[in-house]
Amino acid sequence: MNYIHNPFVLFGYDGPEYFCDRQIETEQLTSSLRNGRNITLTAPRRMGKTTLIKHVFNRIGSKGSGVYCFYMDIFATHSLADFVSLFGRTVIGRLDSSPEKALGMAAGTIRSARLVFSADMMGQSQVSLEFLPQYAEEVLGEIFEYMRRSGKECYVAIDEFQQLVEYAETGVEALLRSYVEQCPNVRFIFSGSKQDIMDDIFSNPRRPFYRSTEKMRLSVISEESYYSFARKHMLGAGKKLSIEVFHYVYSLFGGHTWYVQNILNHLYECSSDCITNDDVLQCVNRIVESESEEYKKHYASLTQNQAYLLRAIAKEGCVGAINSSAFIQRYSLKGSSSVNKALAFLLDNEYVCRSDKGYIVYDRFMNIWLSVQ
């Protein structure tokens, strides 16, 4: 691993030293995969599901283990052809210790697409696919056949899996499910951030993936475990972080991983040797101020009903009974039907998400900005 200047990593995975807790989830995910069970992993965005996946893959797919792990985020894909192209770039040429042998096997299997070879900035071989969109189904089948014929133990994580429902093509879920079933040497993690859509994909009897996976929902890291992690790294830099100050940080964001991590990242670079609540507030205010223009643009793009509801949720912090007369009257909202219509838009566009206790603003820093408007 590269040298890390700040141990509170905000993006990517930099090894177990900088990964906080998740011991139970790591064991559960590892055990399920190694025992042949596919997994549906759901969590709100920025809760840490991607880093958990990469932590598990780092553990079971270490060099020399004979296990091959692949991660792909399909959020930016818009069609089956996009999916197939990304899948091919992720997998092809990597299923052997000898790149030449792996590429030779791929060339003998992928017949409906042209393999295009190139090198990245480090001189490592890269492979992409060129194919006509109407042959996407055939190419997808050939990629799965390439994996099956390899005989290798493989694990594939498909992140933001709910993006499939946005594809114009019909039958994508059924097609993918049929190929998944034909690869006994490949296990899958289907990961997503939109709970309602993911639930429908995997729990609706009318859909192809119904009851085909073991379900796992990622929640917050416990405050005790997170404090132990934070205190250790702060002490390593000669900084004192009291349990009271950490509780203030943790409570401010409801334990939501990325937001807690972001504040810790900023506190690590502050000049104070003994971190205080005032230091925390300064970090929060600096972050919110840096994003305020972006928040103004988003807020201005909303209709009046959507904007008023979003601000009301922010001021409440969490709203359980969103159609209650008390909530509607307190913030001068229109009737329940208008609230429900505005809520549907805010949920679909991820301004708001539903927690175990009620509806909250998705972006916790935006929530702070809204609460003082």
Image (cartoon, rainbow, N blue to C red):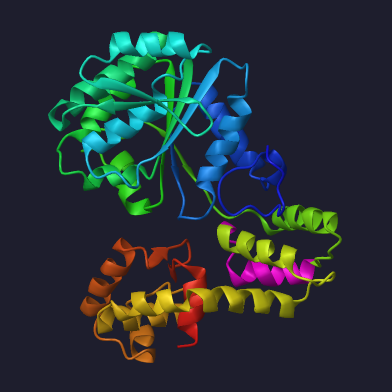
| Occupied quadrant, residue 117 | top left
Q: Is residue 209 visible?
A: no
- Above-or-below relation of 116 to 204: above
Question: In the figure, is residue 305 to the left or right of 123?
Answer: left
Kindly identify the residue that appears in the image at 63 percent across and 70 percent down.
251
Helix, strand or loop for the magenta stretch, by majority: helix
Q: Decide which of 244, 113 is in the foreground and name it.
A: 113
> Would you say residue 249 sits in the magenta stretch?
yes
Q: Position of residue 181 (x, y in %)?
A: 32, 20
Kindly identify the residue that appears in the image at 57 percent across and 27 percent down.
31
- Quadrant of the image containing the N terminus: top right
Magenta residues (range): 243-257
Question: In the figure, is residue 31 to the left or right of 187?
Answer: right
| Occupied quadrant, residue 130 | top left
- Above-or-below relation of 268 to 1: below
- Quadrant of the image containing the C terminus: bottom left
Kindly identify the residue that appears in the image at 32 percent across and 69 percent down.
346
Q: Position of residue 325 (x, y in %)?
A: 33, 85
Q: Is residue 227 visible?
A: yes
